[in-house]
Image (cartoon, coloured by chain):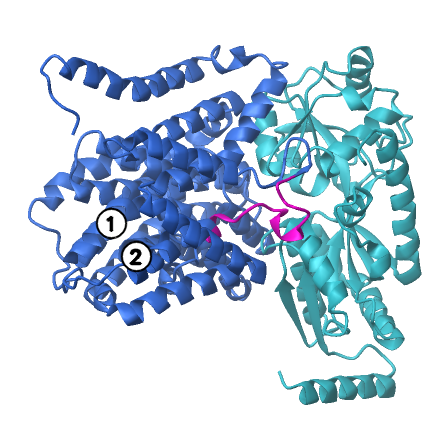
Amino acid sequence: MWEGIAQGLGTALDPANLLWVAAGCCAGTLIGMLPGLGPITAIALMIPVSYTLEPAAGLIMMAGVYYGAVFGGSTSSILINAPGVASTVATSFDGYPMARSGQAGRALAIAAYASFAGGTIGAIALLLFAGALASWATAFQSPEYTLILVFALSSIAAFAERGRVAKSCVAALLGLMLGTVGTDQSAGVQRFTFGRLDLMDGISFILLAMAVFALAEAFHMLTTRDRGGDYRPATSVRLAKGDARAITPTVGRNSALGFLVGILPGAGATLASFFAYDFEKRFTRNPACGIAAPEAANNAACTGSFVPLLTLGIPGSGTTAVLLGVMLSLGIQPGPRLLETDPAVFWGVIVSMYIGNLVLLALNLPLIPYISRLIQVSRPVLIPFVAAFSLVGVYLTTSNAFDLYLMLGFGIAALILRSWGFPLAPLLLGFILSGMLEENLRRTLYLADGSWSMLLDRPATVLLAFACAAIWLAPAIRWWRSRPAGEPES
Amino acid sequence: MNIRSRTASVLLAILGCAISGAAAAERVHVVIPVAAGGGLDGTARAAGRALTETELAETVSFENIAGAGGGRGLSMFVENAARFREALMVNSTPLILRHLQKLYPLSFRDLTPIVGLVADYGIFVVRSESTESDWSGVVERLQADPRGVVVGGGSARGSLDHIVAALALDAAGVDARRVRYLPYDGGGKAMLALLGKEIELLSTGLGETLPFIRAGEVRVLAITSPERVAAIEHVQTLTELGYPVVFANWRGMFASPAVDDDVRERHIQRFRTLTASQTWRQTLEQYGWEPLHLFGEDFTRYLEQQEALLGETMTRLGFTQ
């Protein structure tokens, strides 16, 4: 193995490859920063470039594009509340309010440091345990997935502010329902498509995220009066006093969590970032931790998603599926034999991830003061900018005009829900989890001939079921215990 | 692009062809009805690359029109036939399946078949440590109890992987409508379910499974090809085993319904030359694809046969409404 790592270092430190990883990171960050454009689009756009390169260089560049785009995605999440990837939705929860309160630089810096640490810890874990962890991906089957998804849904309780638990649950249910539009995987029939081809694939995540977050925010700005002073200039790119100390343990534990969840095929990075946010919010109300946790987790998870790709040849997400296509066309066959047939590629990619993270940090920190100035742009300029970019971003991924009308409709609906006090993050979370939850639950029930026992007779599922119960019961117990003291609900 | 300059360049290209009398290098545009990165997308791009490498085309451009499981690209290609007069569209077996299931109003008859490029045969695999050593063992268990073996595949119920399994089991006298089929979101996740012991038998394509076969993780029990395939020469075909089922997931190129005869001829000639080339042989080897190499009318006849076979079985097995 050490021989392999040395060989990988040789590949990754080759000046030409260093240049490609830097180029990939730059391109990925730039594309990822645009609202609506995420890693899949970034990688697809760079496919023609990769064809002109040597296999190792091409793959190293594409990996750079991948984590560059994930990194860049957090920027649009924080600055204009427009997450381009599911995995940066959680970053906007605390990041956008912090940016609006004049601390855009601080929020971006926290995200940059946490991403760097998460990615680096992930790369080291990949380096050391890639082979050993391959079996972790096969250990999770439909019953385990079902419960892990229920657990994720349960964490809605954590996103809910006090007194809004019911509204959060309603929003999550709406999201679950929106997720049922399209072709039913288990029966192969169309649901709620009204005979329209445009709805056959369901509603795209990017479309809903852009409508519910970015467009609704733009509409909201239109309907409220500019009080001024909302956006104070952000001069400092530094962390605030005490931030570094506060986020270090957060970053540490959530990188480990993110890496392990990221290995699981499915929505690895998204689940990881929601879990991380949920987990941190139980310990602290510090918004710095609320940004650092999902950022560390989603970057570690992206690295983790390379475990099944490189060791089993199985893509765990849409992005790694596109990467697999790129690898095949470069003549690299990932899988159990990659380590024997192409050790230079295997280790080169892993080592280059570590270098890529350094490049990203070096690239982004000096840019923060300039990027964060975006937020000082006055409303008459900012609103059309946000609206136009999110509409264009969605149109670019599907080139379907129907999606634009759909998006406008969702944007207006979201504005109304918002004005009634419904939080929208649970809606998006419900939507993301809906399809996977249904598929896994139906498989589980089908295997057990309709009996629910399969959800509870495996060790991992029992553990997860207890965790779900704890989440739901904890607030009730807290309320019951505080009752004798006569504390009113605040 | 300026329409006049495009017309001019097309005219020039036609003139050039007429003079040289061969498929001269020119621009080829390929519409891909799925998102970038999948298997069909890979086939189109690999074929395009081989075309430029062999100088059968000057440049090859691609346009992904994804959506509606390929239906959007198909309807745009047909509805805007004038715009795509010179273009090609890549497509595969679901074109036939989804028309039979009435998910697409359009079929291959609305297109102009040019070439059937490659075939991916259906295979049935088990884990390498499975106690099932041959296909007849699985069949016997399923004949006794159709629900006794859990079969999985990388696509929804009633789509490719499920239908191939149903075809093969139906030929063996198994009540295919009662067999338990678990759908997964993509062949990769179905493979994980096989390795993780959630399913016992996986219905999938040879191309994407080859690395797992070579690594010794899974064992192939049978293949749906007409003859044995070089890549896994020890595996018997269903026909050899006494169940006459031949099925290929083809991938090929189509021209627009409005294509001119001479353009169609040139497309066909271009692919005839390509498929005979060393470059193409290397491409097939690199991706583990089996050649199909059917041109023009031959390809149309092949599609008609497949549609008839699938239509009959799917109606009998209840896959169509």
Camera-side residue: A87 or B124? A87
- Residue B134 appears anywhere in the view: no
| Residue carrying label 2 | A75
Asked whether A193 falls inside the magenta stretch, the response is yes
Quadrant for residue B82, please give it: bottom right
Asked whether B293 falls inside the magenta stretch, the response is no
- Magenta region, residue range: A191-207
Q: Quadrant of the N terminus of chain B?
A: bottom right
Camera-side residue: A376 or A271? A376
* Residue B13, percent from left and from top: 77, 84
Q: Secondary structure under badge 1? A: helix
* Residue A152, percent from left and from top: 38, 30
Quadrant for residue A249, please give it: top left
Chain B colour is cyan
Q: Amino acid at mark 2?
A: Thr
Camera-side residue: B257 or A197? A197
* Residue B42, percent from left and from top: 64, 55
Q: Quadrant of the C terminus of chain B?
A: top right
| Residue carrying label 1 | A95
Question: Closer to the N terminus: mark 2 or mark 1?
Answer: 2
Quadrant for residue B88, please give it: bottom right
Q: Which chain is blue?
A: A
Left or right of residue A451, residue A469 in this image? left
Dot 1: chain letter: A
